[in-house]
Structure formats: C-alpha cells, structure tokens
C-alpha cells in the first residue's frame, strides 16, 4: 500500500528526504537564532556532541544541530564548488549521524532504529569518501 510516509522512507528517496528535513530545520534554527539575537557566525564553538541518556531527546537534537550549524558556518571554503561542497557536507553528514545516535537512545520503534542505524553507517562511509577526496585534491578542485 502506498502512503506518503512509505514513499518518504523508501531507500531511494531517503537522501532527498534527509536533505529537505535538515534544510528546513537549519532554516528554522537560523530564523529563531536571528530573532533571539544570536549570531550564526559566533566564534564560540559549541561543546562536542555526546549522545547520552542524561539529556532529553529535544536537547540532544538541539546539541547536534548546534554543532552541525557551527561547523558548517566555519567550514574552510575556498570558492571552488567541489571543495566547498565537500567541506560543507562533512559536518552536515556528521549532524545526521549525531541525530540518529540520539534517536537510538530513545526509540524502541524497530523501523526507526533500522533507519537510524543505516543513516549512521551510510553517512560514515560518505564522510570517509569526502575526506579521501579532500586529501586527493589538496587544491580543492576536481579534474575537468
């Protein structure tokens, strides 16, 4: 049976769904931060993300987003699209990993647990690929 949720959770549409979800959350955070007088480019880095049952889920998600947003805002960009894409995507993917770890601490839903575990595994591999690309392209450009 087709439902909008089953469509979203299908493996082929998962990366797009995660991107849209992260972008919407980032836009809402930026809007809220602006209205709260926070500077998105604040030089104070948040503490590292630690998935722990000592914090409620919403705090863990906010912590993960704070680290991701800070790291994305402070990515070492050089104006080369390939390089800048990779340097921005690494913290973005790490944010997805951190959020998935937070979910694993709180949910018993086996479908969501499986999804979170897949996100962690897939995003770690993609981070490794992007780090390898950066190492192979120290000038930050891909061969044309």
Image (cartoon, rainbow, N blue to C red):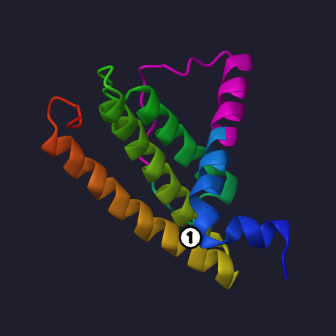
Identify the image quadrant of the C terminus.
top left
Does the magenta portion include 43? yes
**Residue shown at the point (47%, 45%) measured from the top left:** 92
Horizontal and vertical percent position of residue 117: 51, 74
Horizontal and vertical percent position of residue 11: 59, 71
**Residue shown at the point (52%, 55%) measured from the top left:** 96
- State the extent of the magenta-drawn residues as a range: 24-49
**Is 113 or 57 nearer to us in this picture?**
113
Identify the image quadrant of the N terminus.
bottom right
Quarter holding residue 35? top right
Q: Is any atom of residue 6 visible in this view?
A: yes
Give above or below for 26 relative to 118.
above
Does the magenta portion include 107? no
**Is 43 or 21 nearer to us in this picture?**
21
**Residue shown at the point (38%, 45%) measured from the top left:** 90
In the displayed structure image, the side of residue 13 where residue 135 appears, left or right? left
Horizontal and vertical percent position of residue 66: 54, 38
Q: Is any atom of residue 54 visible in this view?
A: no
Give above or below for 100 relative to 140.
below
Q: Which residue is mark 1?
A: 116
**Is 86 or 61 nearer to us in this picture?**
86
Horizontal and vertical percent position of residue 108: 68, 81
């Amino acid at each position: 049976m087709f439902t909008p949720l089953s469509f979203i959770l299908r493996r082929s549409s998962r990366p797009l769904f995660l991107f849209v979800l992260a972008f919407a959350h980032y836009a809402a955070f930026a809007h809220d931060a602006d209205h709260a007088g926070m500077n998105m480019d604040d030089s104070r880095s948040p503490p590292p993300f630690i998935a722990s049952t000592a914090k409620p889920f919403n705090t863990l998600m906010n912590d993960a987003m704070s680290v991701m947003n800070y790291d994305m805002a402070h990515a070492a960009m050089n104006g080369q699209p390939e390089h800048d894409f990779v340097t921005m995507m690494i913290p973005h993917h790490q944010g997805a990993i951190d959020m998935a770890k937070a979910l694993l601490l709180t949910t018993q839903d086996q479908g969501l647990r499986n999804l979170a575990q897949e996100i962690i595994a897939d995003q770690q591999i993609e981070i490794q690929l992007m780090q390898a690309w950066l190492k192979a392209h120290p000038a930050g450009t891909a061969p044309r």
